[in-house]
Image: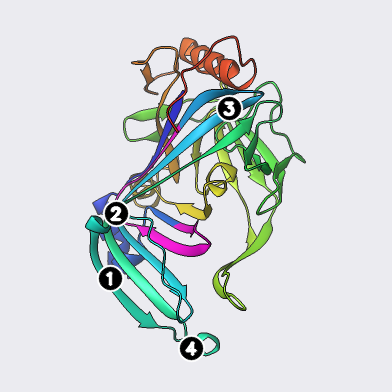
Amino acid sequence: MSLTYISSRYNPYIHYRVSHGDKPDWITTSLMIYNYSGVLYIIKTYNDTVIRFNFSDENNGYILSHVQIELSNVTVMTVLPKGVRPPVFWNESEVLSAKTEKSHDPDFKDWTWYVFRLRKVTITGSYLIREADMQVVKNGKAYGHTMLFDNLLHPLEKGSTFSKYPFSTVVGRVMVDNKNPKRWKNITYYPPLKTVVTDRYSFNLTQPFGKGYPIEIVQMATLIYTFDASDGKLVFTPNGGSDLWAVGVLSTSFSDEYALYQVEVKHDDFYAVGLVLKSFKTGVKKSNTVSFHRPDVKTAYVFYGALVVLLVTAGISKVKKPGR
């Protein structure tokens, strides 16, 4: 089974923002803080952000999830003390430019900013989902509930612990909309739609050298996820979660520019914004890519049936493992 999500670039939205005084480099489809080899990077993506999750049966009560994050037209930045060079996680042939700047922070005068512009960047990783409680697990550490689906047998409720590491959160609100669909381009996501919002929390991300350069300081943040309540899959979210934290993406903000244009310019609030579900494959048939043009009860049963096979009753049906 696989899920594909996207935050798309949309030029009319960029023109709209620029006409209201924003600079083009402020307008991104995703903004990420990525931990690679112990170094924190800020990643700004200006063209499409695409994230694919592919699942296979791991047995022993776990499911293996492979993640592939595809970013195009990207700026990658990091700040490091003297004598420390940035480790590279991108293909050098994709580099358009590279420069360095001295830090202007008086407390970190000997630190240097590295700025790379790249055509594209691909980040990959894997983790486990524990079937018993839907926890994301990596190297024996439980990060929290998967953000990709709500288990219909044990649904997320107010007061449920959502994440544990590196940020601890609890579900603060649960809302179910039985009336209003959400849209994205030629796709319609039909109700019931369930939105889960965590209580507010705070966190700091610092570059881990010496006293630590403050990369990101966030106060009173929340995590928000909207699921298809009929089968449990994530439909859209403005932020990341345990599934991305486990592969080093510690903080994320997603902006689908096509949807934002409809909301902000056309004043149509019935659009799914953030990171939006583009397609999924159930694994029942290799060619069975499901679209969301209209409600389809059979599709919901096929999806949830595949989810149950993978996440609840492993061993009923085996899925071929991909190479590692």
| Residue 63: numbered disc | 3
What whole-number distance in Å separates the C-alpha atoms at marks 4 and 3?
A: 47 Å
Q: Nearer the viewer, residue 115 or 176?
A: 115
Q: Mark 3: few, some, or many residues within 10 Å (few <14, many ≥20)?
A: many
Q: Earlier in the sequence, mark 2 or mark 1?
A: 2
Segment tinted magenta in the rendering: 32-53
Q: Mark 1: few, some, or many residues within 10 Å (few <14, many ≥20)?
A: few
* Residue 304, quarter of the rendered image: top right
Side (left or right) of 144 relative to 100: right
Identity, as a three-letter code, of the amino acid under mark 4: Lys
* Residue 280, quarter of the rendered image: top left
Identity, as a three-letter code, of the amino acid under mark 1: Ala
| Residue at the image position 37 percent from the left and 63 percent from the top | 76
Q: Where does label 2 land, which residue?
A: 91
Q: Secondary structure at mark 3?
A: strand
Q: Where does label 1 land, which residue?
A: 98
Q: Where does label 4 land, which residue?
A: 109
What whole-number distance in Å separates the C-alpha atoms at marks 2 and 1?
A: 13 Å
Q: Is residue 49 magenta?
A: yes
